[in-house]
Amino acid sequence: MAEGGLTSHRRDPIKSSVGNVAAHRRRQNAVEVGKERRESLVRAKRLCRVSSSCDDSDVCIENDMIIDEEQSILEAQTSSAVEELKSAVSFQGKGAMQKLVGALREMRRLLSKSEFPPVEAAIKAGAIPLLVQCLSFGSPDEQLLEAAWCLTNIAAGKPEETKALLPALPLLIAHLGEKSSSPVAEQCAWALGNVAGEGEELRSVLLCQGALPPLARMMLPNKGSTVRTAAWALSNLIKGPDHKAATELIRVDGVVDAILRHLRKADEELATEVAWVVVYLSALSNVATSMLVKSDVIQLLVQRLASSNSLQLLIPVLRSLGNVIAGDSHTIVAVLLPGCEITDNVIEVLVKCLKSEHRVLKKEAAWVLSNIAAGSVEHKQLIYSSEAAPLLLRLLSTAPFDIRKEVAYVLGNLCVAPTEGDGKPNLISEHLVSLVGRGCLPGFIDLVRSADTEAARLGLQFMELVLRGMPNGEGPKLVEREDGIEAMERFQFHENEDLRNMANGLVDRYFGEDYGLDE
Amino acid sequence: MEYNPEFLSQCFLHTLSPQPEPRRAAESKLTELADHPNYALAVLRLVAEPSINEQIRHAAAVNFKNHLRSRWAPSPDSSFTPILDAEKDQIKILIVTLMLSSTPLVQSQLSESLSLIGKHDFPKSWPTLLPELVSNLRAASQSNDYASINGILGTANSIFKKFRYQYKTNDLLLDLKYCLDNFSAPLLEMFLRTTALIDSMVSSGGGSPVTLKPLFESQRLCCRIFFSLNFQELPEFFEDHMKEWMAEFKKYLTTGYPVLESSAEGLGVVDELRAAVCENISLYMEKNEEEFKDYLNDFAQAVWTLLGNVSQSSSRDSLAVTAIKFLTTVSTSVHHTLFAVDGVIPQICQSIVIPNVRLRDEDEELFEMNYIEFIRRDMEGSDIDTRRRIACELLKGIATNYKQQVISIVSVQIQNLLTSYAANPAAQWKDKDCAIYLVVSLSAKKAGGTSVSTDLVDVQSFFASVIVPELQSQDVNAFPMLKAGALKFFTMFRNQIPKTLVLQLFPYLIQFLGAESNVVHSYAASCIEKLLLVKDEGGRSRYTSADVAPNLLVLMNNLFTALRFPESEENQYIMKSIMRVLGVAEITPEIAGPCIAGLTSILAEVCKNPKNPIFNHYLFESVAVLVRRACERDISLIPSFEASLFPRLQEILGNDVTEFLPYAFQLLAQLVELNRPPISDTYMEIFKLLLSPDSWNRNSNVPALVRLLQAFLEKAPEKVTQEGRLAQVLGIFNRLVSAPSTDEQGFYVLNSVIEKLEYGAIAPYVGHIWNALFSRLQSKRTVKFIKSLLVFMSLFLVKHGSANLVDSMNAVQAGIFLAILEQFLIPNLKLITGRIEVKLVSVASIRLICESPSLLDAGAVRHWGKMLDSIVTLLSRPEEDRVGDEPEMPDIAENAGYTAAFVNLYNAGKKEEDPLKDIKDPKEFLAASLVKLSALSPGKFPQIINENLDPANQAILLQICSTYNCPIV
């Protein structure tokens, strides 16, 4: 501690009251710096190695025979296959059609053989313009299918390889329409899904060219791989960061119904794809969120969470639930009313996720709870008295850092009543006293010591609650005993002004040395 | 404007001149030129001019940097003209290339300038910077030009630093993403390339220190950039390339580089890289433990082994600290089980903790050569980055999961250390120091430097057996570091040592004031000072004047004598102790005389050259507390204090000792207040000085001057009204009240005037006063101002009556009173805070509605009712319900102007006075006034109340009236 009054006079007074932030609902940051979560990353682009419809028996047989050959051989074969295709395209004679389809099939076979298809070689040899030509209107389905399949796997390659598809996009989109056969439409959707998975720039190209409405309509029927592929492609297409596509999608006639229907009835595989669509809808579009909230989407998500054990499915469902709760205050105010069955069910499935072995589920569940805990006093009481509380307390002291941080938001929110305006939050003394009594303070003080500025802020905010709110002036003694002063003093010269002021202000206010002498 | 390079270069040359005249002339010329456009550009061109002498270019580069600092993006209230955009663009185009091509001295200035620009403009307003840096980096790396490479990396490092401490907002993440997209790959490329270069040089047996050094520096910079870019979260690119990074990191921790490490300097270079690596792996360990877990075991092993060597060496501090930090992070993580293996904790204690806690030659040197720095680290928590402290942090970290084991192992270690000491105290004294250090450092810390608890030893018996013998030692100069350790222990555990024991030890503490070691006599002074602050349950001081009395003379004597030790002439610990003792002890004339003599002679000394602001502050506090407490006891001492102090104060005013002016004015205010009228002529001289506008030019003086002016108004009101001085006083008021940063001070002056002077004296000026206030109300209306205005109007009313108030306002503009009442008074009444203020404002408002014809008029019925409504709110609701957080946060931004320089003297403080001492309870006053009023016209008021008061307030009012048995009829 700095000496006496002199320094404290010169210090900036605490800027604003401590303890607000924890009380607000938090949406996740819109900008992603980290790797897109693994579980969705494997989804962004997909190679098509086996025909989706697999009705073509010889394709299936061929697939069985695939053995990984030397990459260089494969590349050489690809170059000559492109040459072959070139001559087939210009060939006008008898059996031209068969020749062309044969060349395309060989090309597709080479591009589906290995986990590392010879995409670069194909592009270099000039495959793209030929494939675009093969997509022209009026071509037989078989030809369209093979060409779209080739393009699908080229699009699954590296970024610049995906970009090479640009000239093919208008035709791929055109073949999505109702007039196309469903295998062709599905294969085109797949190719477009890969393009959309590449990034923002290509997504906006696709949107400008009108890819969204036909894809959306493909999602309306009840089952089939077409629906699944379309849902997956859509989830890539609306990923943002711009929110317009998500809003456009939700406004397509029948989409809300289809989503609800699939969530209710579909198998887990389709439900997973649809849940990813819901994830992005609810993350990006307020319009979509408010439409969904007014349906029974929460109910459906909860049922899925309760009944499934598939991690693939649980992750997008849980995240959707979280988004819907964080994104629209209607959810908390009007749907998740304390005392309603749905609310109890939500808490129950979240507890299930908190107990899960899987780190992502634990973290997301804590995040969702933190948002519910930002609701009314009754919400706080509900969580406080549920099975979640002991779980959270244990996680706060044992879990890895990122989970601890989320858990701390929940516990912090449980202790403050909602405020109006910017005032200091009112305490819920009962919760604070009991949670501190059950040993949560050291966990928060640990966060203060961490290098993460947000975690440190949260830790300081909770310390403020303890200092101010524990009865009989117990707060300062508890903080002292847990070595909290030392933790705060680390901020004495911290570069983050806000943290510095908070920590210094707390030390001054609650532990300030008596400067003068009153006799 | 065109700048003549010749001329500029001459100017810069002169700024280096040892002769003050040409130097000042050049400096003022440059300051003048700096206001013109394109000045910065001209200076930058000069810096770039190879034909110009290096010294001049360096001076110009420094000037350029400072110019940018104040003018690139000056704050709105700054008086600097900002650099124009066109000029900025030019600078941004030139600076990177220039920096890279300049000599090291100039390069470092330009690099700092670049970071300054970057702070404001990067990346959004400077999109070319990063691509330019990257392409330069690639080019330089092709030609192995490590001077340029390190220049570029250094710059990148400084512009990326913001990612280490700012909050994770979308804006920050966007910037980060931009930096990652552009810099991640080139960074890795550079890092791997340099690694390969190092490896090939080392393996071929080649490489000299001269060639290797810049390569290691380059790697260190890469590591620091890695740290910044990874700080917020784990970026995709780094996750994908974790293997490459980690492999190299591990290499640097486990490989020796004898060519470099054979010299101390070379070892330092390699260690700095290793320390940077440790920071990076600590970061990953803390925030990305899952992704990092596959590497953890290897790194733990590597760091462990490294520490085994480093701990034995007496230099290598920063590496030891960061490496131990890494282990500490592991110890508190989910992977703490690494420490659970049998024998690990004792091993860590033995080979890492104890060797790092033991005193080293460097510590002894610091103890002797730089006692202030030693104390700062040893006692005041600036040791966060010292080996001793960080080794204890590691123990604390392990103890979060293995508390009992740590306690039992460390307790045994402490016993061993003490036994070893006992066997041969003279040779093994460091063992005892180590034991004491462990006990103090491992206890939980309390603010103000006390320890609350420790499980390691029983405090009282440890104190009796280990500490007391040191304190009672015959020779205060023997083993000074042990003495310091014992005094520190005493200070830290002061709350737990029984009073009787402390009083027995008090004479020994006083003796230590005579120890030659600066640390020892400082610690003794500090221990005494802190003991006098100890409070028992219930907040009563544990030690009183009676406890100090038996030793007081020798104590004061030793304190003043200690200030004569070399380097302790301005020892702040001693001065603070003097202040504290004077605040507790009975100030008899026998004490007061020598003390004022001692303090004033020190004052005379420091006036010549104020150096240590903390020492000086306590010096003035000591004077103030001495004067206050001595005069409380015996007012007749005043003349002798004046006689001692006046020469010093006059010297400060006469020589314009800027640092001390605010203190001097506060002491003068204290003296004026203690004086009985008539005020002597000496003071009146000062009063005249006070009224001259020049005195008020420095903002830092304003609060103290206001304080002094108030004292004069209180003690010599009759003098204020003479010779047109009141007009001068009001001139000062006018000036202060016109600016938001000083308006509060202006009201202090005005309130004193209105409170202390007769209405007759004020009346001629009242119109001016209102005009000044109304125009401020129009130009810049803040909540703080409105509240001050309300308080002033209330004071006016209770001192000079409602008629004077209303009439004087309406004289400025007909009907303005009611307008002000409606717009400001009624809505803002509820914002008033503070016990005295609330009472004043409520009583004044009650009198207004019960006395003033303007409100009792039939046309003002609604005003009357609303006013009463506000009064009831003010009186009945707790402060926190009435007052929201003020949106404008007046106390930081606006006061910033002077808080930087003005320091309040606690002991010369003004006591707040209640202008309405005879009214105890404003609610009772309300009830009594209303009942009286309503009796005059029965039936009139219940209806007005019914129509205008909020229903809740009606109920409250009813309750108030019935409590005091005063029914409204």
Image (cartoon, rainbow, N blue to C red):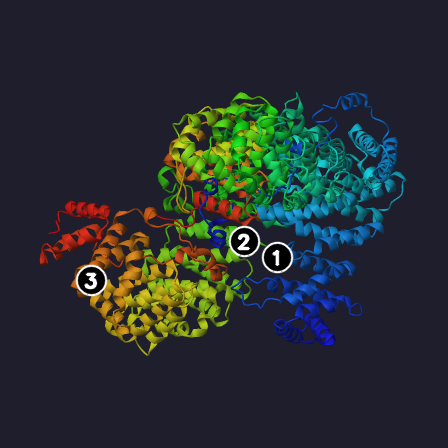
Between disc 2 and disc 1, the foreground one is 1
- Check the residue under mark 1 and report the chain it is in: B
- Check the residue under mark 2 and report the chain it is in: B
Q: Is residue B313 left or right of residue A302?
A: right
The CA distance from mark 2 to mark 1 is 41 Å
Which residue occupies the foreground of this view, B951 or B247? B951
For residue B860, the mark is 3
Instruction: Count neighbours of disc 3 (C-alpha within 10 A) and say few if under 14, some if 14 to 19, many if 20 or more.
Output: few
Ranked by sequence position, the earlier of labels 2 and 1 is 1
Which residue occupies the foreground of this view, B5 or B311? B5
Between disc 2 and disc 3, the foreground one is 3
Q: Residue B909 location, x and y as percent?
A: 38, 57
The CA distance from mark 2 to mark 3 is 67 Å
Residues under numbered marks 2 and 3 in contact, where contact means CB atoms less than 8 Å apart? no
Which residue occupies the foreground of this view, A481 or A432? A432
* Three-letter amino acid code at the position of disc 2: Asn
- Check the residue under mark 3 and report the chain it is in: B
Q: Residue A25 location, x and y as percent?
A: 48, 39
Question: Circle 1 is placed at which residue position?
Answer: B120
Question: Circle 2 is placed at which residue position?
Answer: B571
Which residue occupies the foreground of this view, A335 or B563? A335
Ranked by sequence position, the earlier of labels 2 and 3 is 2
* Three-letter amino acid code at the position of disc 3: Ala
Residue B851, relative to residue A41: is it above or below? below
Choose top left, top right, bottom left or bottom right for residue B407: top right
Does residue B278 appear anywhere in the picture?
no
Residue B166, relative to residue B747: is it above or below? above
Choose top left, top right, bottom left or bottom right for residue B540: top left
